[in-house]
Image: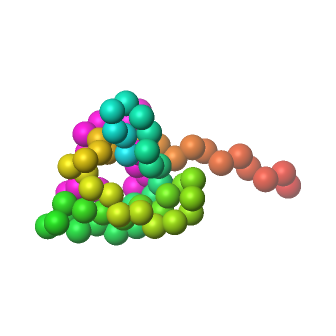
Amino acid sequence: MEAQGVLTGQLRVGDQIEAWHNGKLFHRGRVMDVVPALELFWILDARTGTRKLLDPEALEIRHVEEQAKPLAPA
């Protein structure tokens, strides 16, 4: 289940988020740092592996559940 319209103050380091704009997914990744006073935060982008500074005023931020990773065979 995902929550839509997450505010910067609701984000915590380690949260998995998606950033949408006009119905299109722009970024997905793990929150690395949050600066609530400036309404900004950084993620580690899952697609590129780079840090991205996101502006929640320009994007719709959604929490997403981490997908379960398959167990390695014993």
Image quarter where the C terminus lies is: bottom right
Q: Which residues are magenta?
A: 1-18
Note whether 14 is above or below 7 in the view shown.
below
Residue 37 drawn at (x, y percent): 14, 67
Q: Magenta includes 17?
A: yes
**Residue in the foreground of this view, choosing between 67 and 37:** 37
Q: Residue at x 84, y 51 (%)?
A: 73
Q: Residue 3 sits in which quadrant?
A: top left
Residue 66 drawn at (x, y percent): 51, 47
Residue at the right extreme of this rendering: 74
In the displayed structure, does residue 43 sit left or right of residue 47? left
Can residue 13 be seen from the camera position used here?
no
Q: Residue 20 sits in which quadrant?
A: top left
**Residue in the foreground of this view, choosing between 74 and 54:** 54
**Residue in the foreground of this view, choosing between 47 and 31:** 47
Residue 15 drawn at (x, y percent): 40, 55
Image quarter where the N terminus lies is: top left
In the displayed structure, does residue 47 sit left or right of residue 37? right
Q: How many marks?
A: 0
Question: What secondary structure is the magenta-colored segment mainly?
Answer: loop
Q: Residue at x 45, y 58 (%)?
A: 30
Note whether 26 is above or below 41 in the view shown.
above
Q: Residue at x 40, y 67 (%)?
A: 32
Can residue 32 be seen from the camera position used here?
yes
Q: Residue at x 44, y 39 (%)?
A: 25
In the displayed structure, does residue 25 sit left or right of residue 46? left
Q: Residue 39 sits in which quadrant?
A: bottom left
